[in-house]
Image (cartoon, rainbow, N blue to C red):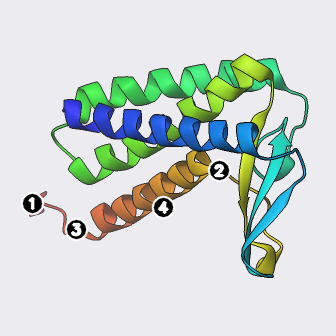
Amino acid sequence: MYFYYIIALAVIALDQWTKHLVVKYMEYGESIPLIENVFHLTSHRNMGAAFGMLQNRRVFFIIITTLVVIGIIYTLYKQGKSNPRMSFALSLVLGGAIGNFIDRVSTGQVVDFLHAVIINFPIFNVADMAITFGVAVMLIDIFMESRKPSHSSSK
């Protein structure tokens, strides 16, 4: 079961390390093409949620994230061994939530830097990727569980 917390810690470490590098080595607004007109590193700050929604709601996000983190830790504790796929997904969401939480608490804004310019996608970070992938795995797990035949007997 501790394996899932190690995954969350790895996400947090990678997220915080990459954000540190962006803050240290890039000017705010600077954009470095990795693949010209396709994918850039762009130094950006976000004071809201995904896609810039709910700007300047720092206290709200701190409270919500705290509740989400508590809920995930409780769920991992209760069902960590019984559903490895869901526990893996929760560990990704946990790591991503804490990664962005650290930014919000320490500076009031989240460091974003991954920019898919080819589709004009909002700039994001490692924590956002972990949350998105974790939620996708959760949805797959829910779908797969709903497709399993029921073991209840009917007469």
Q: Are marks 1 and 3 in contact (CB under 8 Å)?
A: no
User: Residue 149 sits in which quadrant?
Assistant: bottom left
Is residue 96 left or right of 8 when viewed as pictured?
A: right
Nearer the observer: mark 4 or 1; the answer is 4
- Marks 2 and 1 sit apart, C-alpha to C-alpha, by 48 Å
Residue 109 x %, y %: 80, 31
In this rendered view, identify the residue nearer to me: 84 or 151. 84
Q: Earlier in the sequence, mark 2 or mark 1?
A: 2
Is residue 62 left or right of 53 when viewed as pictured?
A: left
Nearer the observer: mark 2 or 1; the answer is 2
Q: Are marks 3 and 2 in contact (CB under 8 Å)?
A: no
Mark 1 nearby-residue class (10 Å; few <14, some 14–19, many ≥20): few
Q: Secondary structure at mark 3?
A: loop
Residue 97 x %, y %: 56, 35
Quarter placement of the C terminus: bottom left
Using the image, tell me which numbered label, if any, was put on residue 128: none
Nearer the observer: mark 1 or 3; the answer is 3
User: Residue 23 sits in which quadrant?
Assistant: top right
Mark 3 nearby-residue class (10 Å; few <14, some 14–19, many ≥20): few
Residue 10 x %, y %: 39, 39
- Marks 4 and 1 sit apart, C-alpha to C-alpha, by 32 Å
Q: Amino acid at mark 4?
A: Ala
- Marks 1 and 3 sit apart, C-alpha to C-alpha, by 14 Å
Q: Which residue is mark 4?
A: 136
Q: Which residue is mark 2?
A: 125
- Marks 4 and 2 sit apart, C-alpha to C-alpha, by 17 Å
Q: Which residue is mark 3?
A: 148
Using the image, tell me which numbered label, if any, was put on residue 153: 1
